[in-house]
Image: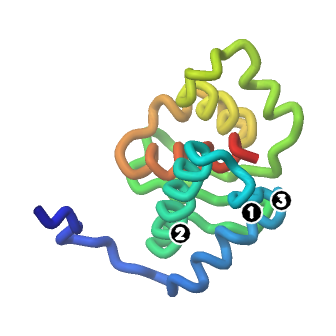
Amino acid sequence: MDWKLKNRPEAKISEESAQAQVLSLLEFYQIDVETMGADQKKAVDTSLAKLTAFVRQGLVDVQAPKVIQHLRTPPGAVSVIEYGEVTGKNMVAMDGRPADDIYGRIYALLGSVSGLGEDAFRALKGIDLSVAENLGMLFISR
C-alpha cells in the first residue's frame, strides 16, 4: 500500500530554507541529536522531519529562540501562538508529572513557554495539535 498523501499541502518555502530554520533551533539550544539514545533519537528525528514540513507549509516560523505557530483551525480568538525562549521556569511547569505522561508534560511546558497555559493546548486539534506536540517533543529533548 502506498501511504503517501494524495493532497499534500502546498510548500511555501524550500526544503533547504525550512531545514535551516529548524536547525537554528537545534543550534540555539545546542541539541545534539547524534548523542541521544536510540529511542530518543528516533522520536526527535521524526519531530524534526515533521517540523520541517510544517515550516514549509507556513504553519511554523522559527526565529530562534522565538517560534511562531500559525493555527489553521483556532479554537478561540487566538490564531497565532508565540513561543519564547525556554527557561528553567518553563521546565518546572512539568514538575509532578510522571515521566511517561509525555503529552501532559508537553502541554504544561508549551503552556508555560507561550504564556497561554496548558488548557489552551488541550483545546487544539488536528494539524495545530500535531505542530504543537512535535515542537514540544523538541523542547523536552533539550
On screen, residue 30 versus residue 81, left or right, reads right
Screen quadrant of the N terminus = bottom left
User: Quick one: SS at disc 2?
Assistant: helix
Q: Is residue 20 visible?
A: yes
Lateral position of residue 71 relative to residue 86, left or right: left
Mark 2 nearby-residue class (10 Å; few <14, some 14–19, many ≥20):
many
The reply to whether callout 3 and callout 1 are in contact (CB within 8 Å) is: yes
Q: Residue at x 57, y 85 (%)?
A: 16
* Tag 2: amino acid: Thr
Residue 64 in the image, given as x and y percentages of width and height: 78, 65
Horizontal side of 37 relative to 50 (left or right) equals right
Q: Residues within 10 Å of mark 1 (few under 14, many from 20)?
A: some
Q: Is residue 119 visible?
A: no
Residue that numbered label 2 is attached to: 52
| Residue under the image location 53 percent in, 55 percent down | 47
Separation of residues labelled 1 and 2 (CA atoms): 12 Å
Which residue is at the far left?
1
Q: Position of residue 65 (x, y in %)?
A: 80, 60
